[in-house]
Image: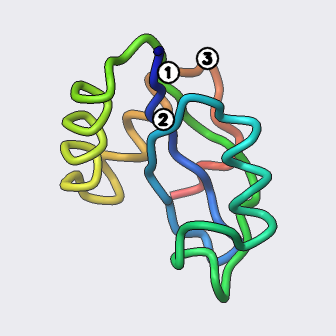
Amino acid sequence: MNWSVYIILCSDDSLYTGITTDIARRFKQHAAQQGAKYFRGRQPMQLVYTEAEHSRRSASQRECAIKKLSRLQKLQLIASSRDCSPFIQN
């Protein structure tokens, strides 16, 4: 099964990192406040980063590595994966 690592921009301007086998389904779950407690009190606004083709193990390891990054490093990672990241204002 192919796993993906993703980052979501939240309504409070925070960045949430997670893993899943179905990004669209997981985003809908977050929007419905099902699953991650992180989304109680904030809403997912936009999927801003994805990495596909991971095994469960490599996705978990990459998620852990991304979560250890500073906010600036996460924004740089997001920007490096796009030609233009209009939401990045910092």
Q: Amino acid at mark 1?
A: Ser
Please name which of the two marks, 3 or 1, marks the residue nearer to the observer.
1
Which residue position holds label 3?
A: 83
Q: Amino acid at mark 2?
A: Ile
Residue 84 sits in which quadrant?
top right
The answer to which of marks 3 and 2 sits earlier in the sequence is 2
Q: Residue 49: x and y, percent?
A: 55, 34
Seen from the viewer's position, the closer of residues 72 and 2 is 2
Label 1 Cα crowd, 10 Å radius (few <14 / some 14-19 / many 20+) = few
- C-alpha distance separating marks 3 and 1: 7 Å
Would you place residue 27 above or below residue 81 in this image? below
Q: Residue 41: x and y, percent?
A: 66, 88
Q: Residue 73: x and y, percent?
A: 29, 46
Q: Which mark is residue 81?
A: 1
Which residue position holds label 2?
A: 78
In screen coordinates, is 5 left or right of 56? right
**SS at badge 2:** helix
